[in-house]
Image: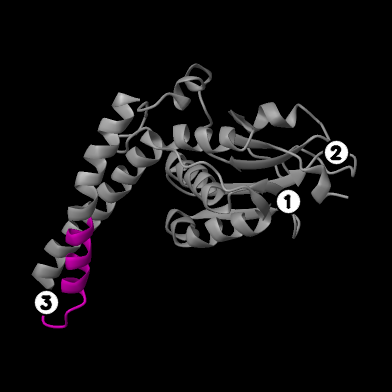
């Protein structure tokens, strides 16, 4: 608890100055009289302040997790929002995006926290792939749970790293806090759910389906990572 208060206090001290730096740099970038040389320097300042702001937000989310405001949430809408926001990143990396979910996949949850969780998992997947490939985002209601799966054609998750990836501050990247999946795990657990890390080939072998015959397995063949966010099914929303 004391460590959380300390991290939160330090993060708050950085947050406001970083916000001022970022907004000032943005204003200078948009001025017509700013030279090309100065724009390159200011762009670097803006990009770094934006990156550090995200780091600060990660620390705050980890140190002081927000309790969910539980309301009926359509996961299809939240997933669409996250994927739309990341469309430019998909295009830049040459990754094809495929959606596999119906118009309504309902749970009780906090749409803002769920957005953050989906965004983090998809963004992590894109970074792990690092280049051309495919990603499938699937959401479905089974007999007992509601599942969201993010699957890709990347290198997959090494068996010896699966447990470590949920440890705070553990990362295999050159940059980042190592808090992304920890925050996702906290969000999923706060919704009474479970975060499962695996690979697509393992999921394909399950051959499980729900009462409507909808396969829990991916609709296309992928060999990379498969991240499953498993939520309690609110039966009152499926009558």
Please name the residue shown 58% across and 47% down the image: 135
> Which residue is rendered at x = 39% and y = 26% of the image?
168
Question: Compared to 192, does 20 lie above or below?
Answer: below
Disc on res. 210: 2
Residue marked by disc 3: 34
Which numbered disc covers residue 106? 1
Extreme-bottom residue of the structure: 32
Question: Which sits earlier in the primary sequence, circle 3 or circle 2?
Answer: 3
Query: Disc 1 or 2, which lies upstream in sequence?
Result: 1
The quarter of the picture where residue 153 lies is top right
Residue 135 seen in the figure: yes
The Cα–Cα distance between marks 3 and 2, rounded to whole angstroms, is 59 Å
- Split into 4 quadrants, where in the image is the N terminus? top left
Q: Residue furthest top?
A: 160
Residue displayed at 73% across by 32% down: 204
Measured as percent of width and height from the top left, residue 134 is found at: 57, 48
Element type at marker 3? loop
Residue neighbourhood size for the residue with mark 2, other residues' Cα within 10 Å, grouped as few (<14), some (14–19), many (≥20):
some
The residue at the point 36 percent across, 34 percent down is: 63
Residue 83 lies in the magenta-colored region: no
User: Sequence-wise, which precedes: disc 3 or disc 1?
Assistant: 3
């Amino acid at each position: 608890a004391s460590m959380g208060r300390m991290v939160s206090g330090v993060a708050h001290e950085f947050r406001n100055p970083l916000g001022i730096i970022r907004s000032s740099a943005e204003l200078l970038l948009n001025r017509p009289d700013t030279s090309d040389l100065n724009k390159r320097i200011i762009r670097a300042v803006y990009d770094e302040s934006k990156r550090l702001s995200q780091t600060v937000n990660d620390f705050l989310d980890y140190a002081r997790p927000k309790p969910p405001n539980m309301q009926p949430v359509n996961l299809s809408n939240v997933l669409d929002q996250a994927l739309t926001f990341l469309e430019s990143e998909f295009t830049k990396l040459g990754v094809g995006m495929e959606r596999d979910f119906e118009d309504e996949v309902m749970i009780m949850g906090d749409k803002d926290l769920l957005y953050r969780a989906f965004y983090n998992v998809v963004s992590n997947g894109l970074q792990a792939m690092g280049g051309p490939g495919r990603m499938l985002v699937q959401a479905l209601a089974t007999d007992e749970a509601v599942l969201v799966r993010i699957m890709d054609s990347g290198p997959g998750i090494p068996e010896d790293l699966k447990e470590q990836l949920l440890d705070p501050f553990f990362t295999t990247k050159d940059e980042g806090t190592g808090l992304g999946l920890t925050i996702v795990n906290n969000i999923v657990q706060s919704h009474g759910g479970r975060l499962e890390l695996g690979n697509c080939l393992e999921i394909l072998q399950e051959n499980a389906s729900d009462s409507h015959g909808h396969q829990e397995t991916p609709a296309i063949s992928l060999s990379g990572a498969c991240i499953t966010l498993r939520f309690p099914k609110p039966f009152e929303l499926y009558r």
